[in-house]
């Protein structure tokens, strides 16, 4: 069962509908036992990093998410679901889950950027060489998750902050918005995106299907 974690940060129905479009049923829940029984866990979210972490703590789900990742269960983080995997955010100096080393930084107004970064932007595929599984990459080094998705394809973004991983090898794609930033990361059982696949039409649905197929769900 594919489970979408409800931590009170919205966007849940659109994520569920995206999975329905590719023929997959989901449940939306904050019930710890149901989450732990899942075969694939999705953590979406829009809004505040601080609010997301506060809600996870109130629901007693911080250790649940860490446990899911530690035992190797497929985990898909979307937008805030990517950011909270890191150590801390510049937003209120809030601590994250610390799964990955690195910070969440805010786009600089000094670059004359409109913040939030909202709308369509392209992603640049990166060749990662981190040991994960033999099936994770094809012969060219491209992640199987991006099968049949051309380089520089467009996806939908809505965010004011971006992740800055210390280990650049986990970066699956980059995107330019004043600076080049990590727009998705991949490591072992974790795939997380700053963009919104559920709002990215054909490319987003293809990406979700690829990930579901890759994880055997």
Image: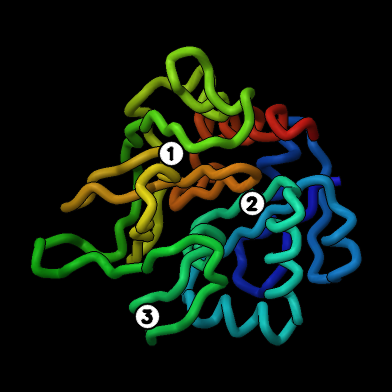
Lower sequence index among marks 2 and 1: 2
Residue under label 3, please give it.
Answer: 91
Residue 91 in picture, x, y percent from top left = 37, 80
Q: CA distance from mark 1 to mark 3?
A: 24 Å
Q: CA distance from mark 2 to mark 3?
A: 26 Å
Q: Which numbered marker is on residue 172?
A: 1
- The residue positioned 32% from the left and 36% from the top of the image is 122
Q: Which numbered marker is on residue 150?
A: none
Is label 1 or label 3 in front? 1
Mark 3, other Cα within 10 Å: few <14 / some 14–19 / many ≥20: some
Q: Secondary structure at mark 2?
A: helix
Q: CA distance from mark 2 to mark 1?
A: 24 Å
Mark 1, other Cα within 10 Å: few <14 / some 14–19 / many ≥20: many
Residue 178 in picture, x, y percent from top left = 16, 52
- The residue positioned 72% from the left and 73% from the top of the image is 63
Residue under label 2, please give it.
Answer: 14
Is label 2 or label 1 in front? 1
Vertical arrangement, residue 126 with respect to residue 103, above or below: above
Picture quarter containing residue 99? bottom right
């Amino acid at each position: 069962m594919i489970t979408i974690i409800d931590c009170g940060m919205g966007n849940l129905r659109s994520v569920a509908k995206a999975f329905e479009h590719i023929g997959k049923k989901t449940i939306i829940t904050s019930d710890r036992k149901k989450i732990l029984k899942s075969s694939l866990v999705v953590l979406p979210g829009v809004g505040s990093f601080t609010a997301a972490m506060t809600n996870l703590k109130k629901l007693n789900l911080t250790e649940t998410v860490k446990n899911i990742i530690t035992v190797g269960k497929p985990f898909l983080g979307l937008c805030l679901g990517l950011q909270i995997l890191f150590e801390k955010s510049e937003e209120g100096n809030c601590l994250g889950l610390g799964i990955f080393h690195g910070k969440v930084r805010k786009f600089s107004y000094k670059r004359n950027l409109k913040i939030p970064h909202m709308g369509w932007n392209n992603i640049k595929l990166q060749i990662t060489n981190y040991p994960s599984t033999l099936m994770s990459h094809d012969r060219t080094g491209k992640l199987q998750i991006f099968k049949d998705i051309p380089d520089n394809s467009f996806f939908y973004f809505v965010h004011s902050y971006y992740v800055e991983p210390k280990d650049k090898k986990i970066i699956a794609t980059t995107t330019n918005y004043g600076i080049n930033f990590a727009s998705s990361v991949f490591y072992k059982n974790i795939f997380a995106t700053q963009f919104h696949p559920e709002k990215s039409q054909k490319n987003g649905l293809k990406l979700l299907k690829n990930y579901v197929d890759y994880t055997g769900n």
